[in-house]
Image (cartoon, rainbow, N blue to C red):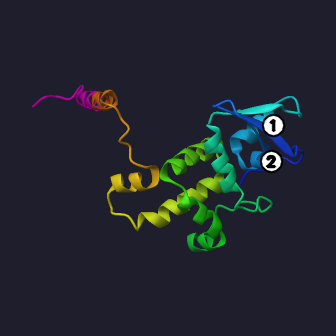
Amino acid sequence: MISTIVNLPETLKIRTLDNQVMDVTGKLINESKILKNAFEMHEDPEVGEMLVPAESTALMLALEFLEYFDLDEPHNPDFDRQTFLEANRPAMKFLAGLPEGDKARMTHVIDYLECDRLIDCVMVYILTNVDKISSSTHEVRRQFFGDCKSYTEKDDEKIVEMHEEVQVNRNFGRRRS
């Protein structure tokens, strides 16, 4: 659990990668290790804007997800999965209802911001639903993060080249029989 900053302003401005400025509550800063550290390191207590390297739509989804939690309650990462599911049913329902692309973008944002409360919720969601999916890791990835058929032929060639380089590096220096 991270400590909270007591003298946070009621709202802060966050600028996103798509150059949108959003007003967020100070409670978001206390939920995010990254934003908390940035806020504490800033010399001026009246911080103007904080930059978050994410699209505004993904950040808005993360903020909407955060609204399902009582932020006045400290986050306790030591929990029983079933108890957690019951206590956070509305948040889990919100997460389950998101389209896969939105879920992936939002997960990227909460991972970057290091919002442990939201990361734990996503992890419980994944663990709970993995049993319902076939044992294929490809199926699990597709279920939670969408299908990655947007690769171009050039992307595929780069991936093959990287695998070939790894194979060459593994064989380098081995004696031949």
Hey, what amino acid is under mark 1?
Glu
Query: x, y (%) of residue 122?
Result: 56, 57
Residue type pointed to by label 2: Thr
Look at the image and say whether residue 170 sits in the magenta stretch. yes
Report the residue marked by disc 2: 25
Quarter of the picture holding the N terminus: bottom right
Q: Position of residue 111 (x, y in %)?
A: 59, 45
Residue at x 63% of width, y 33% of height: 53
Read off the magenta span: 163-177
Across the whole image, how many numbered discs are drawn on residues?
2
Quadrant where the C terminus sits is top left
- Report the side of 63 relative to 156 (left or right): right
**Residue 139 appears at what percent x and percent y?**
35, 56
Residue at which label 1 appears: 40
Instruction: Decide if residue 81 is on the left or right side of residue 131.
Output: right
Question: What element does badge 1 sit on?
Answer: helix
Find the distance from the CA under tag 1 to the CA under tag 2: 16 Å
**Marks 1 and 2, the one that precedes in the sequence:** 2
**Vertical placement of residue 146 versus 15, above or below:** below
Q: Secondary structure at mark 2?
A: strand
Residue 109 placement (x, y as % from top left): 60, 43
Name the residue at 66% across, 71% down.
87
Q: Is residue 10 left or right of residue 52?
A: right
**Magenta stretch, overall SS:** helix
Residue 59, quarter of the rendered image: top right
Instruction: Residue at 84%, 44% (x, y): give it.
Output: 11
123 drawn magenta: no
Q: Residue at x 27, y 31 (%)?
A: 160
- Circle 1 crowding by C-alpha within 10 Å: few under 14, some 14–19, many from 20: few
